[in-house]
Image (cartoon, grey):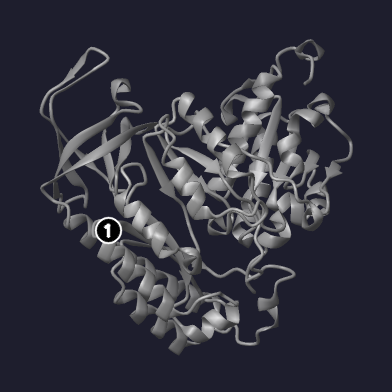
Amino acid sequence: MIDPSHFERRTVSFYTLGCKLNFSETSTIARQLEKDGFIKVDFREGADIYVINTCSVTGIAEKKCRQVIHKALRINPNAFIVVTGCFAQLKPKEIASIKGVDLILGSNEKLDMSFYSGSFVKKNKAEIHAGNIAKDKRFMPSWSLGDRTRTFLKVQDGCDYFCTYCTIPLARGRSRNATIKDTVEQARKAGKAGAKEIILTGVNIGDFGKSTDESFFDLLVALEKVSEVERFRISSIEPNLLSSEIIQLVASSPRFMPHFHLPLQSGSNKVLKLMKRKYDTELFLQKIESIRKNIPNAFIGVDVITGIKGETENDFETTYNFIQNLDISQLHVFTYSERPNTQALKIQHTVLPEEKKRRSALLHELSAHKLRKFYKRFENTKAKVLFEEHLSNGKMHGFTENYLRVECPFDPALINQIIEVKLMTISPQSGNMTIHLPEYSLHDNEFQNISEKFDF
């Protein structure tokens, strides 16, 4: 730990790009530096140090990183700039060439931020610390708290799949995790710190246990006994790793929410083979049907990539028709972006940018239709909502057990409270749904017959 007397309460700000895993790691870095005596401030306040945690899934994510660096230096030209994360791991020299960057930390080095904080002095040349992630078997635990009511708990890192379009194994290394015992302890710490809901996150969470000779299902069984946390959610899990016993556990558990997120990526078996995915559409359909049979009200989100090299017009139509017939709640649509050092670059057929845009628009439209249909199912029903601290335009929001998003006027008494509400109807003007919030007494504030809207 650095002696705070070595600096005069320097301020630090954070900017996170990319996935929930990155958010959990940024939050852990922030706690480390605050413990060392740094003062966390808003990005716009002109911090002494800016820590930018990057993503490299798409070219847009890398472009955004550069923009954030330039924005930080416009706010404070003398700021010490730290860039870390996947982009930093993959292209440290490229980032070092950006004027104003002082320190670059790779995927594992970033969680040793306190080790480097003593050298947070503006440099003439960027300093790089990015080791060989492929050989690094360390697992660095992390969890988020403070910026969001819901907490992201990192349970796994890295990936052994090496899909042809993906750089994540190159940026995060091989699959690894802590023990169930240590992971449960992290969950207890988050719960004691105030987290009422924990989202289990990682690169390939269903692969949990490979480095400790345990299993993801066993982890879920252990977490269900963590009394300090009221709610758990499973983030994205590979369809081939979503076992029937996991589905059954969620179906019967009072703590695991009826919410799944599965990466489909393509509804064409030909394209799935080109991607080197470990399932086909037949298996994917079986998983969706199993969820619906056991948990009819579950929210099911699905990832899909469009415009990948090799995806013909016929392949896209096959994907569209397959998804159209799936009983799911929402799509997360990604437009393919070529990534250096990936096997997909060897595929000859390339989709033109305007065609990628057209396909993406069609899938977004299909997603909106499915989401509205899913919400309509719950008109005039009751649900329990965990209200979050996040404030936007005078509104705060929360989520039901099955991930319906509720929004109402901000009131601090609602923060981090689970309240039963009645879902009313979707407004034809805004597409929002009204709710009825019965009388409650929270921190001596009375809420009587409040009817507000929520945005999905």
Residue extending farthest to the bottom is 314
Q: Say left or right for 90 vs 280.
A: right
In the image shown, does 234 or 424 lie closer to the viewer? 234
Q: Is residue 78 above or below residue 238?
A: above
User: In percent of the image, x 62 and y 39: which residue is there?
Assistant: 25
User: In percent of the image, x 50 and y 31: which residue is there?
Assistant: 188
Does residue 366 appear in the picture of this structure?
Answer: no
Q: Say left or right for 244 vs 274.
A: left
User: In percent of the image, x 42 and y 76: which residue is there?
Assistant: 283
User: Could you say whether the residue bearing mark 1 is in a helix, strand or loop?
Assistant: loop
Query: Which residue position holds label 1?
Result: 295
Q: How many marks?
A: 1
Residue extending farthest to the right is 124
Report the amino acid beneath label 1. Ile
Q: Residue 342 appears at what percent x and percent y? A: 70, 72
Mark 1 burial class by Cα count in 10 Å: few <14, some 14-19, many 20+:
some
Q: Is residue 355 above or below residue 426?
A: below
Does residue 203 appear in the picture of this structure?
Answer: yes
Q: Residue 348 appears at what percent x and percent y? A: 65, 87
Q: Is residue 61 above or below residue 243?
A: above
In the image shown, does 166 or 335 lie closer to the viewer? 166
User: In percent of the image, x 75 and y 56: which residue is there?
Assistant: 90
**Residue 310, quarter of picture:** bottom right
Name the image quarter holding the N terminus. Answer: top right
Q: Residue 10 appears at what percent x and percent y? A: 71, 18
**Residue 344, quarter of picture:** bottom right
Q: Residue 231 appears at what percent x and percent y? A: 37, 39
